[in-house]
């Protein structure tokens, strides 16, 4: 009889957040696949659990994934954990879940800590509709392209960011979304020095220029308002098309992207670009 894969969320800061069900699953699993075995070993020692650990992370997932799947097909039960939070969310565990699904293995996700949802709930931003964007690229061009694609996004946006990249990310966000766009910066969630800074992108840039950021951040950015989406003019469209073409896009692709970003009909953008 084939085994199962359990996705076991781990505390994002406060060890008291481990649930009884998570603990029982870790105790009953035949082995545990961990993003960093050293980090997971500390948690297991805290819980008084001794279990076989298998390393499974971004740079070995191709080979280790196959081995884990074979063990599960042979009848073993695997508990997958990340360093913190829910496995498979901005995490290499995503690939293991796909492999198990393709192999017909049952995957069971146990509810628990998730930094994105924790931050959203205390952000003070709209929670009715939101999108999770994870980590932005370290490459400036790719990061800007990602943000440009969200220029007209009306849902609340959630990002993860490391302290050494925070200021660059905030500067790029301010350039794309506008300095007045509201943002909630949530850091050290569930830890002793948990902090939520509710401000604007422009003010956040000023704050962290003067005070170097510390700790891991979840950024909750307000979506564009309907007024912001409808306020674009043909002149704005022409300028944006020219900007995108200067970055290397063809006229056709630049017009298509501008129409999407500014919520304007393609023919309006096309005519504006020709007149310019």
Image (tube, rainbow, N blue to C red):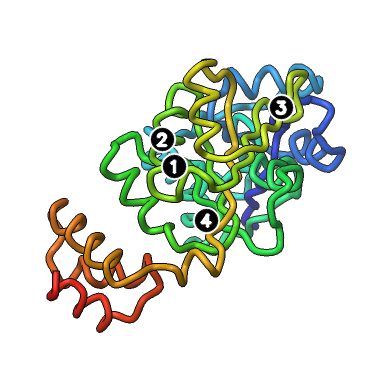
Dot 4: within a 10 Å radius of its alpha carbon, few (fewer than 14), some, or many (20 or more) residues? many
Q: Residue furthest right?
A: 20
Label for residue 171?
2
Disc 4, SS: helix
Q: Earlier in the sequence, mark 4 or mark 3?
A: 4
Q: Earlier in the sequence, mark 2 or mark 4?
A: 4
Task: Judge depth for marks 1 and 3 and give the one in front.
Answer: 1
Residue bearing the label numbered 1:
174
Q: Are marks 2 and 1 in contact (CB under 8 Å)?
A: yes
Horizontal and vertical percent position of residue 270 = 20, 78
249 left or right, relative to 1: left
Residue bearing the label numbered 3:
195
Task: Judge depth for marks 2 and 4 and give the one in front.
Answer: 2
Dot 1: within a 10 Å radius of its alpha carbon, few (fewer than 14), some, or many (20 or more) residues? some
User: Where, by quadrant of the figure, is residue 173 drawn?
Assistant: top left
Residue bearing the label numbered 4:
100
């Amino acid at each position: 009889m084939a085994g199962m894969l359990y996705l076991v969320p781990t505390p994002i800061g406060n060890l008291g957040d481990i649930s009884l069900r998570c603990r029982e699953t870790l105790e009953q699993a035949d082995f545990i696949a961990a993003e960093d075995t050293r980090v997971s070993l500390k948690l297991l020692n805290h819980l008084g659990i001794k279990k076989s650990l298998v390393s499974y992370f971004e740079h070995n997932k191709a080979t280790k994934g196959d081995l884990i799947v074979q063990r599960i097909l042979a009848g073993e039960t695997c508990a997958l954990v990340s360093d913190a939070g829910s496995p498979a969310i901005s995490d290499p565990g995503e690939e293991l879940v796909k492999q198990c699904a393709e192999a017909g293995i049952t995957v069971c996700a146990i509810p628990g800590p998730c930094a994105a949802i924790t931050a959203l709930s205390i952000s003070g931003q709209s929670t009715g509709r939101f999108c999770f964007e994870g980590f932005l690229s370290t490459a400036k061009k790719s990061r800007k392209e990602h943000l440009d694609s969200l220029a007209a996004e009306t849902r609340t946006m959630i990002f993860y960011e490391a302290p050494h990249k925070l200021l660059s990310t905030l500067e790029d966000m301010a350039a794309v979304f506008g300095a007045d766009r509201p943002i909630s910066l949530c850091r050290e969630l569930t830890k002793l020095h948990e902090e939520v800074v509710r401000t604007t992108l422009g003010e956040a840039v000023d704050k962290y220029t003067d005070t170097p950021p510390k700790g891991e951040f979840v950024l909750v950015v307000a979506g564009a308002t309907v007024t912001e989406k409808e306020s674009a003019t043909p002149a704005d469209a022409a300028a944006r098309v020219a900007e995108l073409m200067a970055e290397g896009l063809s006229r056709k692709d630049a017009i298509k992207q501008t129409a999407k970003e500014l919520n304007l009909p393609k023919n309006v953008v096309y005519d504006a670009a020709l007149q310019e």
